[in-house]
Amino acid sequence: MKILYLFPIVLILALNISCKKQETASEPQLLFSSGFENDVTLLNPIDGYQFIQGTDNETGFSWPISILGSSESALHFVDDDSYQALENEIQTVTGHDGNPTKALYNVQYYDVGVTQCPYEILNITEGESDLYIKYWIKMDVASITQPDQWRTFFEWKTKGYASGDGFRLIAYIYTDATGNPYWHWQGDANPMSPEWEIDNHTIPVPLGEWFLTEFYWHWSEGDDGRALWKVNGQVIGDHYGPTTRNSKPIDFIMLTQIYGDANPKYQWIDDIEIWDSIPD
C-alpha cells in the first residue's frame, strides 16, 4: 500500500524536475562579453587583418570572438591605402557611466574605393541561429551632421550575398539635405534592392555621446523571422518577416563597422555582449 501512495508523489517530483530542466535549457545564454579590460590587446595588422587578443578578466571571456562555430574573427582593413586611411586603437577614455574605461577606437581618415574596417566574425557554421548583440558606441559629431551623407556601424550577410542570392541586414545613420541625422534599418538582396527598409526620424541620433545599440534577429525565411534594432532602449525598427533568402545560413557578422561617405569619422566601442536570444 505504501508503494501505491508513493508512486504518484515520485511521478510528480520527476515531472517537476523535468520541467525545471526544460526551463533552464530555454534561458538566454551569454556567448561573449568584453569591455576590452585587463589583458586585452590589439596586435599589429598582418595581411589586411588586425587581431584582438587576450582575456578580459572582468568578464572571463577571451578574444578573438568565437561564436556560432566561427573559427576566425578580426578587424578587416579594406581599401586601406597601405594602412594610411584607417586606424584602430584600444584607448582609455571616459565611458558611458562617466568612469575611465578601455574602448576600441576606430578612425577612417579618407576614402580609397570602398574603404572600411569592420570587426568580422568569419567562417560561421551555425548560421541558422538566433542572436542578440549589444554594445555602447560613441561617434564624432562632424561626420553625422554633414548634408546628404551616410555611415554604417553594424551588418551581417548570409552565404551567397556577394553572388546575388543571399541577404544582408544593415544599420545606417543617414543625414538629410540640411545635415539632420536619422536612423535607417534595412534588409536587402543587394545594396540597391531593399527587401524592406525602415526610416526613423522620431528618436534623436545622439551627437558626441555614448549610446547603447541592440540588435536581435530570428533567422527564418518565413513570416516568423524578426529583425529588431533598439537605441537606448527605444525601438528604431522591428521587422517581422524573412531574414534570409533561399534558405541561406549566416555567412559572417560585421559586429562593428566604420564605413560611409562623410570623412574623417571616428567612433569608440565598449561593453560588447552577445547572447543566443534576448536576455531577460
Image (spheres, helix red, strand yellow):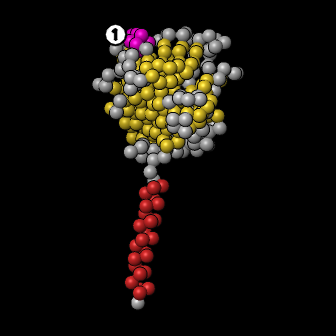
Q: Residue at x 57, y 42 (%)?
A: 68
- Residue 132 appears at what percent x and percent y? 46, 39
- Residue 10 appears at what percent x and percent y? 43, 76
93 displayed left or right of 40: left
Q: Which residue has dot 1 on it? A: 178
Q: Quadrant of the N terminus?
A: bottom left
Q: Residue at x 29, y 25 (%)?
A: 202
Q: Secondary structure at mark 1?
A: loop
Residue 83, placed above or below residue 29 = above
Examine the image and state in which quarter residue 138 appears.
Answer: top left
* Label 1 Cα crowd, 10 Å radius (few <14 / some 14-19 / many 20+): few
Residue 7, placed above or below residue 57 = below
166 displayed left or right of 44: left
Q: Residue at x 48, y 13 (%)?
A: 265
Q: Residue at x 43, y 61 (%)?
A: 20
Examine the image and state in which quarter residue 252 appears.
Answer: top right
The amino acid at mark 1 is Thr
Tell whether position 144 is magenta: yes
133 displayed left or right of 123: left
Tell whether position 145 is magenta: yes
Q: Nearer the viewer, residue 223 or 27?
A: 27
Residue 64 appearing in the image: yes
Residue 255, placed above or below residue 21 = above
Residue 187, placed above or below residue 247 = above
- Residue 42 appears at what percent x and percent y? 61, 23
Q: Nearer the viewer, residue 207 or 239?
A: 207
- Residue 62 appears at what percent x and percent y? 59, 36
Q: Which residues are magenta?
A: 141-147
User: In this view, which residue lies farthest toward the right?
Assistant: 47
Q: Quadrant of the C terminus?
A: top left
